[in-house]
Image (cartoon, rainbow, N blue to C red):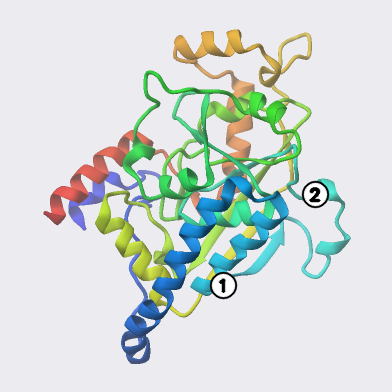
Amino acid sequence: MEKFSQFRDRGSGISPFMPSPAPTPSLLSTLSGPLIFLLRLPFFVLYTISYFLLLPLLPSPLRKLLLWGFFALTGTWWSDLQLDGVKRGSLSQQPPSRIPRGGTVIAANFTSPLDAVYLAAVWDCVFVQSFPGSRQVRKLSLWQAISLALSPRQLTGPGDNEKLTTIAQLLKEHPTRAIAVFPECATTNGKGILPLSPSLLTVPSSTQIFPLSLRYTPVDDTTPVPGGVKVWLSFLWKLLARPTHCIRIRIGEGLVNTVGASNGVSHGESSAVDVRGRQEGGDGELTAEEQRLLDKVAETLARLGRAKRVGLTVEDKKNFVKAWEKRRR
């Protein structure tokens, strides 16, 4: 697609916003797909509505258990979980500090609505939306985190009257829960890692940041192009019409935000006034040490996901989506 060559990364040639082609269907899957879809659809809709209506009343263990019902209904399985640098078969021997848990931050790549469902099912996360160039975040409900992967809302900044916060503040408010961050700010097809938001720089030095990569089979389960009803229906069709989907999970070693002032106080422990002041001033240039932390998280995500870091930004994705929609009219 020569028209979209301008949205390829100059260094690697990767186009992270291009939808992945669907695998060639067999005759059996072509014939059985509509039947599987029609059988699953009423149960899926009823289960989804019931779950989100009851969500505020459910205790955390029950919320996590019921979320696995979504995976069962859609035939989605996490068949491959590995910790970076840990040999297969020895996961149970690892200390608790080696995996995400309450009071830590998960920095995940952003490719599909299934990202949020998996993270919530395993860790009952508090989700946030990051913004390019901003240390502040918007707190999301589980449904908002799921829908963000399909919504053009991922391409816009926060509203004037929107309540923003920092990851450090959310860690104080939810000390027993993990905070899930999608620092790329927008979805990709999983082939490239976009420049990360500086929102991770507010994480206190006492808190671990776990890079986490999620990859899917079939590869077109990713949703790099947001949109309206057609995009939602297309994803729902792929999710329900196929017999199975697989998730490959890779968890990196916990990183620590060592960026701090000379007195040892990290940005994550700064006052709300200080953070707000930096935001109103546009956050300014990152220091070399701050950039090294973001680079380390991005490099780990790229290595875990067998992807490449790219220089394309959310602004480039806005332009790609405009060109993509124009082409499809």
Find residue 123 and report its horizontal and vertical position in percent: 68, 50
- Residue tagged by mark 2? 98
Residue type, mark 2 in image: Arg
Horizontal relation, residue 323 to residue 126: left or right: left
Q: Position of residue 305 (x, y in %)?
A: 56, 56
- Few, some or many residues within 10 Å of mark 1 (<14, 14–19, 20+): few
Q: Which mark is residue 151?
A: none
| Above or below, 79 relative to 111 | below
Residue drawn 56% across and 23% down?
165
- Residue 79 visible in the shown view: yes
Task: Look at the numbered disc 2 and give the secondary structure of its residue.
Answer: helix
Quarter of the N terminus within the rendering: bottom left
When asked about the image quadrant of residue 161, the answer is top left
Quarter of the picture holding the C terminus: bottom left
Q: Which mark is residue 72?
A: 1
The front one of 25 and 238 is: 238
Q: Residue furthest left?
A: 329
